């Protein structure tokens, strides 16, 4: 609990600083005009593409979870939306734990193993993002801090994946290591923790066939293309492409920078960090701060509000109390 409080405090501090930076030098009259004259038909198109991207994400998750158990896409989509809705209210990406719990409880799978598939999913996302950044670097240079952040994310993801695979393959050595590390704890507690970790590692499994790897790669590319389409639609909605002669890859640059905002500690819903980095990306191409912030507000709202509303509805259907995420996930199934 204390750790979550520290993470929340750090997120609120960083988010508050980013909000202050985003508002600095903004012409609010210009911002209001941008919001008033936006073509919201493009925003609705972006919402549609966002929902398609989430369906593709649930479809991809089905392949990542298949070595543990085959689960239908509808259930995975519902759990995904519930988890995303929770992330709008709670810090530290606890919504990911909730969606593992929802799938585990409904389909009789260990929540720990399901969570492992989500960790693998996030590693795939990081690698996809870095690949996208590499493509964009051919046509537009990123600031050094963006390249350094991407390198750090890729290194962390690769090391995490290597560690998980090594722990999974060396089961006997992993068991001895855990027993040695957890020896100071009471026997009942250490045995429970070892069982949970071993169950978690069972979810880190090779896909069932070479075609599944290809399918995951194709779905990952489709997901990120949808994300790029969302930003392009929003740029069109605010007439920024024509007004500032923005190149086709500007939406990709915005996508890369705003994705970094999801990784660093922030407030629930990434308020502040998302808006500031979105604004920074557009300022690089000469878009005024007020119009850039208007764009960021709408882009953030369309990525959060529809998903949160849909997630709350689905949570009610599944009998999940989002506000009791931590209570509901304290005792994951160990089946």
Image: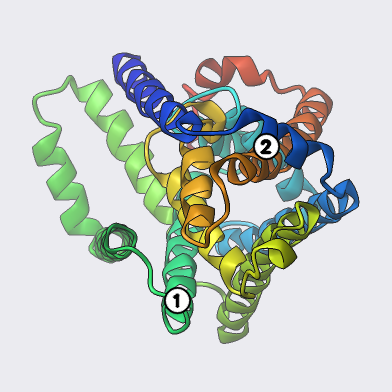
x and y percent of residue 280 in the render? 46, 49
Question: Quick one: 332 or 308, which is closer to the camera?
Answer: 308
Residue farthest to the right?
41
Residue 335 seen from this side: no
Residue 212 seen from this side: yes
x and y percent of residue 21 in the render? 41, 32
Proximity of marks 2 and 1: CB atoms separated by less than 8 Å: no
Vertical position of residue 188 compared to residue 228: above or below: above
Residue at position x 66%, y 39% in the image: 294
CA distance separating discs 2 and 1: 28 Å
Q: Secondary structure at mark 1?
A: loop
> Which image quadrant is residue 137 in?
bottom left
Residue at position x 57%, y 48% in the image: 288
Q: Secondary structure at mark 2?
A: helix
Residue 30 circle label: 2
x and y percent of residue 281 in the render? 49, 55
Residue at position x 47%, y 28% in the image: 19
> Which image quadrant is residue 13 in?
top left
> Which image quadrant is residue 236 in?
bottom right
Residue at position x 48%, y 24% in the image: 331
In-image side of 120 versus 6 (left or right): right
First in sequence: mark 2 or mark 1?
A: 2
Vertical position of residue 25 compared to residue 60: above or below: above
Q: Nearer the viewer, mark 2 or mark 1?
A: 2
Vertical position of residue 334 compared to residue 90: above or below: below
Quadrant holding the N terminus: top left
Report the residue marked by disc 1: 140
Residue 180 circle label: none
């Amino acid at each position: 609990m204390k750790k979550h409080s520290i993470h929340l405090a750090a997120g609120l501090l960083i988010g508050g600083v980013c909000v202050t930076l985003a508002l600095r030098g903004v012409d609010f009259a210009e911002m209001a005009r941008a919001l008033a004259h936006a073509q919201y038909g493009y925003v609705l198109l972006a919402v549609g593409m966002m929902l398609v991207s989430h369906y593709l994400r649930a479809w991809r998750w089905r392949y990542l979870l298949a070595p543990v158990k085959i689960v239908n896409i509808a259930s995975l989509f519902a759990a995904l939306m519930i988890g995303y809705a929770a992330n709008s209210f709670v810090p530290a990406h606890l919504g990911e734990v909730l969606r593992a719990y929802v799938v585990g409880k409904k389909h009789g799978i260990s929540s720990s193993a399901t969570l492992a598939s989500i960790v693998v999913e996030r590693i795939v996302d990081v690698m996809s993002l870095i690949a996208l950044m590499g493509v964009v670097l051919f046509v537009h240079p990123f600031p050094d801090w963006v390249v350094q952040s991407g390198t750090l994310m890729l290194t962390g993801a690769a090391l995490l994946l290597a560690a998980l695979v090594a722990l999974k393959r060396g089961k006997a050595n992993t068991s001895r290591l855990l027993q040695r590390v957890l020896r100071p704890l009471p026997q009942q507690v250490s045995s429970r923790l070892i069982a949970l970790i071993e169950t978690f590692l069972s979810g880190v499994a090779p896909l069932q066939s070479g075609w599944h790897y290809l399918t995951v790669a194709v779905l990952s590319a489709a997901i990120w293309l949808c994300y790029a389409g969302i930003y392009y639609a929003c740029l069109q909605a605010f007439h920024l492409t024509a007004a500032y002669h923005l190149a086709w890859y500007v939406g990709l640059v915005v996508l890369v920078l705003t994705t970094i905002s999801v990784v660093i500690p922030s407030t629930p819903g990434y308020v502040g960090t998302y808006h500031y980095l979105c604004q920074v990306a557009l300022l690089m191409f000469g878009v005024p701060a007020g119009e850039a912030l208007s764009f960021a507000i709408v882009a953030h709202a369309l990525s959060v509000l529809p998903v949160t509303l849909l997630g709350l509805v689905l949570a009610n259907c599944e009998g999940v109390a989002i506000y009791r995420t931590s209570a509901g996930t304290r005792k994951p199934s160990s089946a």
